Image (cartoon, rainbow, N blue to C red):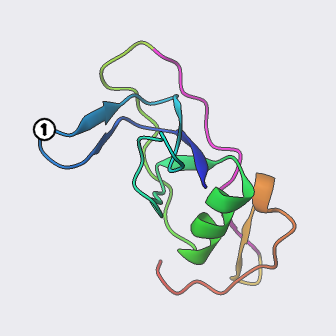
Amino acid sequence: MATWRLLSDVLVGGAGGTYLAAGTIQNDGPGGLLPTGWVSPNADPLDAGALALFAAQGPVLPGRIVSQFSTTVVNPPATYWAKQSNGQYKLTGLGAALAPVWPWRI
């Protein structure tokens, strides 16, 4: 299971799907609203399952932090890719213990 804090509004399930508001905590476990294996640069990973998915996607540009349809204040992510002086990228926050990687998607 992976647990995320959404940094922007998300629509899962395509047209007519389920709207999930920015700032909410969502998961892909039993009873969760996210599809299994869901990952996005517009979400902050909150557990080991989400961190593994986030790290596996490699360095990506961060998504927008915006709450479009509510007045919820959404704080910046604690876990994101930060560029190092040698050109590698390293995760901050929950992923700080992981080794830096070379960019392959940016």
Q: Using residue 36 as the reference point, say whether residue 90 is left or right of it.
A: right
In the image, residue 47 sits, relative to residue 5, either above or below, namely: below
Q: Residue furthest front?
A: 30
Q: Residue at x 61, y 30 (%)?
A: 75
**Residue 50 or 88: which is nearer the viewer?**
50
The answer to if 73 sits in the magenta stretch is yes
In the image, residue 56 sits, relative to residue 68, either above or below, namely: below
State the image coordinates of residue 3 (x, y, percent, origin top left).
Answer: 61, 46
State the image coordinates of residue 104 (x, y, percent, origin top left).
Answer: 52, 87
Q: Secondary structure at mark 1?
A: loop
Q: Quadrant of residue 40?
A: bottom left
Q: Residue furthest left?
A: 15
Q: Residue at x 77, y 79 (%)?
A: 100
In the image, residue 98 sits, relative to residue 48, either above or below, namely: below
Q: Quadrant of residue 21?
A: top left
Mark 1, residue position: 16
- Mark 1 crowdedness (10 Å alpha carbons): few <14, some 14-19, many ≥20: few
Q: Quadrant of the N terminus?
A: bottom right
Q: Using residue 88 as the reference point, say whether residue 96 is left or right of it.
A: right
Magenta range is 72-84
Q: Residue at x 42, y 48 (%)?
A: 34
Q: Main secondary structure of the magenta part?
A: loop
Q: Is residue 69 something that shows in the picture?
A: yes
Q: Is residue 58 something that shows in the picture?
A: no
Number of marks in the rendered image: 1
State the image coordinates of residue 26 (x, y, percent, origin top left).
Answer: 52, 38
**Residue 59 or 56: which is nearer the viewer?**
56
The answer to if 82 sits in the magenta stretch is yes
